[in-house]
Image (tube, rainbow, N blue to C red):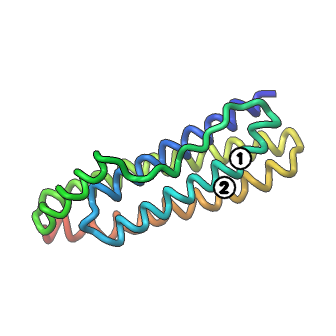
């Protein structure tokens, strides 16, 4: 069985998405809803990684639990520059670009959960299936929020901006 590989794909996708969400939030800290929601979603990625730990142990997959890091110096610089540039058209285009890139990463995490769920079903591992289904629901919530932000920002940036 290669469930360890499927677990590793999910762990990598979740950790990577958490990093991207935190970066997005710090880069666009002047947008308070973006800042707070991205940090909340990054913390939820960390929760998903924690839920995978017992399964990673059982299948000898590498354990990843580093998605809950606090902002470092680079993030603080991004936040300050975000506040300085607030209200200018360039940050709005950058926000739209960053949302789009993070949306793609969110779908990468979602498909990793789909693959894990299908593999867990084939292995008849009911505990892992339940964990994967919860993870899949959470992954869907994340990309839906990102898509909504893209829908909200697009007309303002591309037409009115």
The 10 Å Cα crowd at callout 1, few under 14, some 14 to 19, many 20 or more, is many
In contact (CB < 8 Å): disc 1 and disc 2: yes
Residue at 20%, 58% in the rendered image: 80
The 10 Å Cα crowd at callout 2, few under 14, some 14 to 19, many 20 or more, is many
Residue at 35%, 66% in the rendered image: 34
Question: How far apart are the alpha carbons under marks 1 and 2?
Answer: 9 Å
Q: SS for tag 1?
A: helix
Which of the numbered marks, if any, corresponds to residue 32? none
**Outermost residue to the top:** 1
Residue on which disc 1 sits: 52
Which of the marked residues, 1 or 2, is nearer the chain's N terminus? 1
At which x and y percent is residue 105? 46, 46
Q: Nearer the viewer, residue 72 or 96?
A: 72
Q: Mark 1 or mark 2: which is in front?
A: 1
Question: Count of labels shown?
Answer: 2
Q: Is residue 87 positioned above or below 14 on the image?
A: below
With 5 as the anchor, is 20 left or right in this view? left
Q: SS for tag 2?
A: helix
Q: Nearer the viewer, residue 153 or 32?
A: 32
Residue at 67%, 50% in the rendered image: 50
Q: Quadrant of residue 64?
A: top right
**Outermost residue to the left:** 88
Residue at 87%, 45% in the rendered image: 125
Quadrant placement of the N terminus: top right
With 12 as the anchor, is 38 left or right in this view? left
Residue on which disc 2 sits: 135
Quadrant placement of the C terminus: bottom left
At which x and y percent is residue 90? 13, 57
At which x and y percent is residue 25? 35, 59
With 136 as the anchor, is 149 left or right in this view? left
């Amino acid at each position: 069985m290669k469930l360890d590989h499927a677990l590793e794909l999910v762990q990598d996708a979740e950790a990577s998405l958490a990093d991207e969400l935190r970066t997005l939030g710090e880069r666009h800290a002047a947008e308070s809803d973006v800042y707070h929601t991205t940090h909340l979603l990054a913390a939820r990625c960390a929760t998903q990684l924690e839920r995978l730990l017992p399964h990673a142990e059982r299948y000898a997959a590498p354990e990843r639990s580093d998605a809950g890091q606090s902002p470092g110096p680079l993030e603080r610089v991004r936040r300050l520059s975000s506040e300085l540039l607030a209200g200018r058209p360039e940050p709005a285009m950058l926000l739209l670009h960053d949302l789009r890139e993070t949306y793609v990463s969110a779908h990468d995490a979602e498909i990793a959960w789909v693959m894990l769920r299908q593999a867990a079903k084939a292995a008849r591992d009911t505990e892992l299936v339940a964990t994967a289904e919860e993870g899949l629901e959470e992954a869907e919530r994340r990309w839906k929020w990102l898509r909504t932000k893209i829908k909200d920002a697009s007309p303002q940036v591309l037409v009115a901006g």
